[in-house]
Image: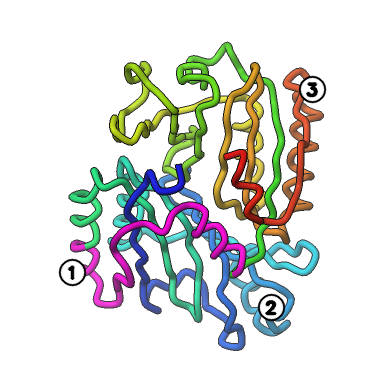
Amino acid sequence: MDRKFDMQCVMRMGADFNLFPFPESYTEPVPMFLDFRNSFHRAIMVLDRNVSVKDIQLLKFQYEVKQSGAMYTISRDIPESPIVNKIHDIVNTRGASIVAIYLERGILKMKVKFHHTADASISEHLLSMSMDDENFHIDYLGPSEGIKKNILDLDRMFSLTALSFSVDEEASSQDTLARFPEGTIFELQNKAGANMTILAYPDRMDATPEGATEISRDDLIYETGYSHAVLNAIRSTAFSEGIVRYNYFGRLENGRVRLMILLLKSHLTAYLSVLDRVRKENPKWNLALDGVSHVRDSIFLDF
């Protein structure tokens, strides 16, 4: 699955795209997370303790600020604008998916991967953004570096943790992974809407499952909605806690959904707290923590 999404784009928005009054004293890249569930109305950034007390006080005066260990999580609603609407359109393009969003010296940077069948749609959005905003720039548009390279780059930039857990599949739901061959890998997408959307990468597929959309028959990529009581609760709670997650992989094996999540190392304790809370509230699903490790080559062997 590493290069099935064979294209990618890196873009940046200038200082006029003012999500936060960025602390001038802070020069490190800042991880960002955009909450698309409610039509892209929420932004979250994470700063470490190197930021000055004065800058934090300024942010606290204007936005919601939470402290977790050595990290500050700052959240705010995003005012609607043409550039915001275009980002929303790119994120929701069929056959496209967010890789990373971050701030660098106050400039918003976004990396998107997409399948070449989405070339025309992505091109249309990029050209429109270039015409609408003189501070919008395309840094790269071309062949993808692959999922593994993107994750390792993010780990070097922000320090990630790989966390694995498993839960019983919800067979009663119509949106089950059982529609795909056993062992199919899926990847959660950060799309707009309250429900989960996943990319499915089966090794074989005779026909498109009911309710799924075929992205590429040749490359065996499908997009579909997915619902699971426990995973829905974890996702919703993690959003509300401002926990920054990146890739979210899974597969169905012997009636269990096995998952691996890449998240900021600084948010590991907060995410474990979410898992424990949801586990206690939903004991019948047998949620179990399977592993926690640094990001390294060996974690990709299972996915």
In screen coordinates, is 139 left or right of 45? Answer: left
In screen coordinates, is 70 left or right of 110? Answer: right
Residue reaching furthest to the bottom: 25
In screen coordinates, is 3 left or right of 195? Answer: left
User: Residue shown at 55%/48% (left/top)?
Assistant: 247
Residue reaching furthest to the top: 172
Within-10-Å neighbours for mark 2: few <14, some 14–19, many 20+: few
Residue 262 on the magenta segment: no
- The quarter in which the N terminus is drawn is top left
Residue 53, image x and y in percent? 73, 82
Residue 20, image x and y in percent? 51, 72
Residue 248, image x and y in percent? 57, 43
User: In the image, is residue 212 above or below residue 290?
Assistant: above
> In the rendered structure, which disc, 2 or 3, sits on the residue that comes first in sequence?
2
- Res 131 label: 1
The region drawn magenta spans 127-156
> In the rendered structure, which disc, 3 or 1, sits on the residue that comes first in sequence?
1
Task: Give the SS element for disc 1.
Answer: helix
Which residue carries the number 3 mark?
283
